[in-house]
Each structure stands twice: as C-alpha cells, then as structure tokens.
Image (cartoon, rainbow, N blue to C red):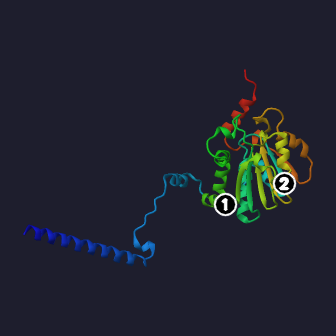
Amino acid sequence: MAKKSRAQCSLNSSTNHKKRSAGRRKHNNNTENIHPLESADIYTLHSTRASLDTAYSPRKSKAPLEAKNFAQKQYISAIKNHCLTFGIGPAGTGKSYCAAGMAAEALESGHVERIVLTRPAVEAGEQLGFLPGAVDEKFAVYIDTFRDILNERLGSGAVDYHLRHGRIVAAPLAFMRGKTFAGDSFVILDEAQNTSVQQMKMFLTRIGEGAKVVVNGDINQSDIRGPNGLSDAVNRVRNLQGVFVHQFEREDIVRSGLVRALIDRYEQPVG
C-alpha cells in the first residue's frame, strides 16, 4: 500500500512538472510577439547626480544679452565689429560673461558652427597633473565659469548636446598648437595673463579667415614669472586693422561693490 502511494505521488509530481514546463513554454511563445513595453512594467530611475545637476543648473534666459554698463556696451560692440578683441581689466567687470554670452547667441542663431573655449593650465602655480582623472576631466574645472554662462544662455540640455557633438569644444591652450580656427568658429581665450609670449603668439597665429576671437585677462593678476603674453600682445597689436583692445576700469566692476573695495585694498601698499 505504501509502495502504491509513493508511486502515485511520483506520478503526480511528474505530471505537475510537465504542466509547469508546458505553461512556461506557452508563456514564452506568447511574449515573443508582444512589444517589449507591453510585456512588463518598466521603471526608469534617475541618478542622484542627474537630479542634482537639474536642480542646480541655471534656467535658460529668454532675454537677449544686455550690457550692464557703458563699458560692457562698448565691449560687446567691439566683439561684434572686429575679428580679434582684447578685453583687459580687473575681475568682476563681465569680460568672460559678455564673451561667452555672445558666443552662445552666435551658435544658437547659426552665425557660427562651433565655440572653442581655452585657457592656459595655470592656477596659482598648480598644473593639470595636480588634479586626478584624464586630461578632459582635469580641464573641466577650468571651464566651470563658461559652463554656467552657456547653461544660462542655451539651456543645460543644449549645452550637453553641443559638447557631445563637438559644437562646443574646451581644451587647454597647449592643445591648440597645430590647429586652425576656421571662419565658422567663435574662440575665447580666458585668463590670458597666464600665457607666455610664445603661447600667445602660437594662439594668435591659429586664427583663420572670418573667425571671431576674444582674448580676456587682467594684466595685473598674472601667475607666471616674467613677461606675460597678454601685455606683450596688447602692445604689439595696437592700431592693427581688425583688432580692438578694450580696457575695463575698476569703476566698471559689476560683480559687487565688495569686490571693487577688495581690489582697492589689495592694490594699496600694506602698512
């Protein structure tokens, strides 16, 4: 009797296994013809980093770029009407903001096909090797100011798209050797007071016909020893056709009144 019961259990187990196998095969065959989105519920989880980037990215400004004072108005006009423009003067005058804003508008309107952002890899004596990561990751910290401005003028999504497709290019000045800035490019060299004379010569001789180039810096804030390429270039290009040198003064600082006061104190003799 016990043997018969065990045999019946074994038979039932085998039958149930076959039914489950057949059911699985039938289910698989049915789902082969179902669109992937219909076969299961799909949930997309956004990373914390992506959420933070979205939360803290400035919204795209719908208003056109406007000068905050007469000095900026002259500077913007100079960039529009000259192939090469030098913006020199103290921090907080809007040199980088105006240049990057104009570059963004030119890209969005189709007047240029590419924005090239560059600066010498010099920060208070530290070099790129001081920072971890690949070269592009190391240099990313040097273009944060431009990234914020471009996000404001174009929108962070558009900036990401243009970066991926090479329409916005950022690279250390040393990587500009051998390149030519084509006529469909808007090129900005920032912190130019940290270039050597030879680096500035190399950069300026990259300018192609029709390219728009802006060179910004504060001659009095150089972090390199010896003569800097910005002051040398300004002396060489004066009265050259197609070139404009715009000098910002301390009174043109728009960042804050405190910045103006701090610059005054730092430029006064101590004692």
| Coordinates of residue 147 in the picture (x, y in percent) | 65, 51
Farthest residue in the top direction? 271
- Taking the image as drawn, is residue 67 in sight? no
Quadrant (top left/top right/bottom left/bottom right) for the N terminus: bottom left
**237 is higher (above) or lower (below) than 21:** above
Camera-nearest residue between 264 and 23: 23
Which residue is drawn at the image coordinates 71% and 42% (left, top)? Answer: 92
Camera-nearest residue between 210 and 30: 30
Mark number, residue 117: none
- Judge left or right: residue 122 versus residue 31: right
Farthest residue in the front direction? 3
- Taking the image as drawn, is residue 138 in sight? yes
- Judge left or right: residue 66 versus residue 207: left
Quadrant housing residue 22: bottom left
Question: Which element type, helix, strand or loop, lies under badge 1?
Answer: helix
Q: Which amino acid does label 1 sit on?
A: His
User: Within 10 angstroms of label 2, few (less than 14), some, or many (20 or more) residues?
Assistant: many
Q: Mark 1 points at which residue?
A: 162
Camera-nearest residue between 160 and 4: 4
Q: Name the residue under label 2.
A: 207
Quadrant (top left/top right/bottom left/bottom right) for the C terminus: top right
| Coordinates of residue 156 in the picture (x, y in percent) | 61, 57
Q: How far apart are marks 1 and 2 (CA)?
A: 22 Å
Question: Which element type, helix, strand or loop, lies under badge 2?
Answer: loop
**247 is higher (above) or lower (below) than 76:** above
Q: Earlier in the sequence, mark 1 or mark 2?
A: 1
Q: Which amino acid does label 2 sit on?
A: Ile
Quadrant housing residue 162: bottom right
Which residue is drawn at the image coordinates 82% and 37% (left, top)? Answer: 228
